[in-house]
Image: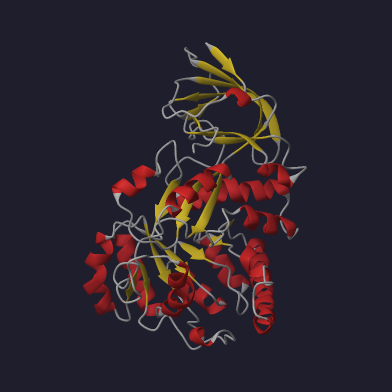
Amino acid sequence: MATVAPAQVGPQTRSPGNIALINGQWFDGKAFERRQVYSVDGRFTFTKPTRIDQTLDLGGTWIVPPFADAHSHSFGQGIPGSDARSAKGYLAAGVFYVQSQGNLPMTAAEKAAIRLNTPAGVDVALSNGTLTSHTSALHAFLAANILPRGAFRGYTLETLNNVRYFEIDTAAELKAKWPSILAQKSDFIKTYLWLTDNAPFVGPPPLMGQHALSPEVFREIVRQAHASGLRVSAHITSAGDFKAAVEGGADEIAHLPSIGVVSPEVAKLAASRGVPVVTTIAQAAATDSLPPDMRTMAATMLAAATLNMKTLVANGVAIVIGADTPADTTVAEAAYLQGLGMFNNAAMLRMWGTATPAAIFPDRKIGALKEGYEASFLALEANPLLDWKATRRILLRFKQGLLLDPIAQ
């Protein structure tokens, strides 16, 4: 029976069997406790198995659940090499669970090439063709910001229609397109609500006056999706969108509302229905790259989003972390949220490592260092409750009974 220290660990592609995890300080959701833990068949147990194949000495490190990104656009963007870079970047950052809020369908070969959804790779829930309207701001955004950056190579805005996105304005149109939507084999359905309450938006001309799905069509999408066993994520912008999404049966809200004020009553309804809300506000705080005439608008929207987040938290809504940009694996998003002072470091760890993974994969036992949960964790060099930057000093990555370090090239 071998005993190894983190510095001696090499990457593995299959579980070495029953592993005794010694000398670790384990996060219980509030504090760290030194205890004996075992990985058996890729699951945690606190009962010593009859056979131990390997002992891993954690060297007094601080053990936390892996992190997650509930709003990614890093996979299935049609850019050569980007999927592999994203997968490696996420693993390096300790982010094992990712939710892609809009992508091209990925082939089995593309997923296998980067070990997607395997013990040795990142676990990703994909939303392939997203659902919007014929007059959605999504079209302008893709044309102005995404296609010029080289995404979706080989496609035009027109040929992306009914592949990367579906335009739906009526229940009849939804019925006609639903077989094609299901054929995409998405893990969940991503939808767009955009200023359903006609809230004023002072922004770039391509986005002014644009609307996405109506509340009526949105409700029908939710009904169809739930009947097919699929969750629904709703992109929102305003407080009115938030209300329409919650009342319409959304399973998740993508983005904090940055226009208008969410009422405590609507926040309580979201909490009672267990609807988590994804943050995505760090990039909104980075206004230096914006033209001067847009910085005031961005600052106003950021302030509204922050105020609405306080209302949501006060009324029991689960806040989960998402970056909404391939430039951030959620490290910057988590750092920004921690810097607001709204959440202490224990709450941040629960948000990033427990609530967010559970929102992405609600049917799995992940996000906690508990009996029967998947044996996945990060070993940190220092105590993140005292020093948040310790979340960046990862000495060991362990996923479903596999040692992932050093991260494979």
> In this orientation, does residue 109 appear?
yes
Going 24% across and 71% down the picture, which residue do you hit?
177
Where residue 90 appears, as percent x and y from the top left, is 53, 47
Q: Is residue 145 left or right of residue 78?
A: right
Quadrant of res 299: bottom right
The image shows residue 160 at horizontal and vertical percentages of: 32, 71
Q: Is residue 136 above or below residue 311?
A: below
**Would residue 200 appear left or right of 286 to someone viewing this image?**
left
Placement of 24 over or under 141, stated as above or below: above
| Depth check, front residue: 157 or 251 | 157
- The x, y position of residue 75, in whole percent, is 43, 55
Which of 100 and 193 lies nearest the eye of the viewer? 100
Q: Quadrant of residue 258?
A: bottom right
> Quick check: 236 above or below 356?
below
- Res. 362 visible in picture: no
Q: Position of residue 250 (x, y in %)?
A: 44, 66
The reply, left or right, for residue 80 in relation to residue 19 is left
Nearer to the camera, 166 or 220 = 166
The residue depicted at 30 percent of the width and 81 percent of the height is 170
Give the camera-side residue of 71 and 346.
71
Q: Residue at x 42, y 80 (%)?
A: 136
